[in-house]
Image: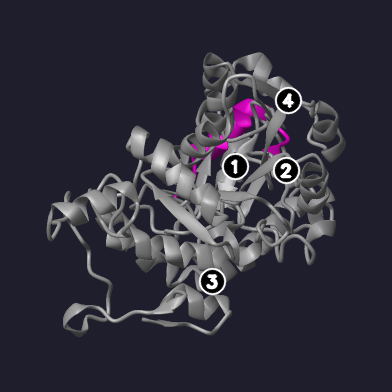
Amino acid sequence: MSKNKSTNINTLAIHGPNKQSYPNGSLSPPIYQTSSFVFENVAQGADRFSGAEDGFIYGRLDNPTVRELEQRMASLEQTESAAAFASGMGAISATLLTLLKAGDEVVSTSALYGCSYSLLQHHLPMFGIKVKLVDEVAESALEMAVSENTKVMYIETPLNPGLEVLDLSRLIDFCQQRKIITVVDNTFMSPVLQNPAVLGADLVVHSATKFLNGHGDVIAGIACGREEMIAEIKSTMRKDLGAIISPHDAWLLMRGLKTLPLRVARHVENAEKVAAWLEQHPGIKSVAYPGLASHPGHALIGSQMSAGGAVIAFELQGGFEQAVAMMNQVHLCRLAVSLGDVETLIQHPASMTHSTYAPDELQAAGISSSLIRLAVGLEGVEDIIADLQQAIDKAMRKVNISAA
């Protein structure tokens, strides 16, 4: 096995960081569908359990197919190592439970993916971990929330579902000066558009279900970071929670990674056109998309991220009833949660992905009942726009809102 000298993300996505030679000349990596691995003798088994010898023991701990996926993800996020999980929440939960203990504090925003919010707000405090969630999506608010007990700052950017953008360089520099560990959820951007570790983030997590896989048929998660941190996550919480990805899902995810740069480029191209169309539509009250010049986070394109991604949040003039009517009228777009799939997906955060929030918590997080989240897919952009147009027109007629 030789090192792949290229740093081009298109090459790395296809070939990974190492030139692989597979059994029987296979072009595709094998799926090691096994629960256990055989030792040559008792001494070898003991050495593997003690860590004196590298090797495989049991599928809940490690697997050759999983390990290759991890090497590929580490190369894409430009980190030393990575750990693969059975879900994005498996990655986030195992990472935070490894880093935090009773008496420690974690700081984040109150606007987060619904299950991440539930983990922080409702579950971590049961372990004696203090959680501070700031309502204002601003670097200064996060900085002011930090105390001498703060161990971790957990950051989503862009935020789910409102698409607010936080300045990673500022927050990471602030945390480094205070020896606070930064964990950044990079799901919305993918390593194609944003590399938090290059900016100094300690750990980068993904719901690999989304852009990394891209085909709506795998649930998976990834954590990337320094070797010692990832090794601790693997040997403690991933092992003890049993959250490792299956070999078959790891193989599917590697297959998805091969087209990641191509898919993300098309996602962005489509999203930019859809967002611009929505912004000029008279029936639309507001559009949040970092790729629009009107978005406050647009200024960070070129320094923090290379484009605005493929997720758009918007509201119709007619409020909640019109939003529901519009989503019920789509044909090409699919009414489903998730994002990063080849299909365009549309959903209602307040009642779906963020249903873990109480009504007052939704208000505090700035998630309105009329907010729609659109994850733009790879269909012909004229078809996506035509579907949105007919759905909006029907919804406006239904609630007596004129487009004129």
Asked if residue 209 is among those painted magenta in the image, a careful observer would answer: no
Q: What label does residue 149 carry, if any?
A: 4
> Residue 312, position in %: x, y?
65, 49
Q: Earlier in the sequence, mark 1 or mark 3?
A: 3
Could you tell me which quadrant the C terminus lies in? top right
Residue 179's x, y, as percent? 75, 41
Q: CA distance from mark 4 to mark 2?
A: 44 Å
Q: What residue is shown at x 36% (from left), y 65% (from top)?
A: 68
Separation of disc 3 and disc 4 at Cα? 40 Å
Q: Tag 4: residue type?
A: Asn
Q: Secondary structure at mark 3?
A: helix
315 displayed left or right of 380: right
Q: Nearer the viewer, residue 369 or 367?
A: 367
Mark 2, Cα crowd under 10 Å, few <14 / some 14-19 / many 20+, is some
Comparing 247 with 342, the one in front is 247
Element under disc 2:
strand
Closest to the camera, between mark 4 and mark 1, is 4
Give whichever of discs 4 and 1 has the lower sequence position: 4
User: Magenta region: which residues?
Assistant: 315-331
Residue of label 3: 261
User: Circle 1 — which element?
Assistant: strand
Mark 4 falls on what kind of element? loop
**Residue 356 appears in view:** yes
Q: CA distance from mark 4 to mark 1?
A: 36 Å
First along the sequence among labels 4 and 2: 4
**How many angstroms separate mark 1 from mark 2 (CA)?**
13 Å
Callout 2 amino acid:
Ile
Q: Which residue is mark 1?
A: 373
**Earlier sequence position, callout 3 versus callout 4:** 4
- Closer to the N terminus: mark 1 or mark 2? 2
* Pointer 2 residue: 284
Q: Are marks 1 and 2 in contact (CB under 8 Å)?
A: no
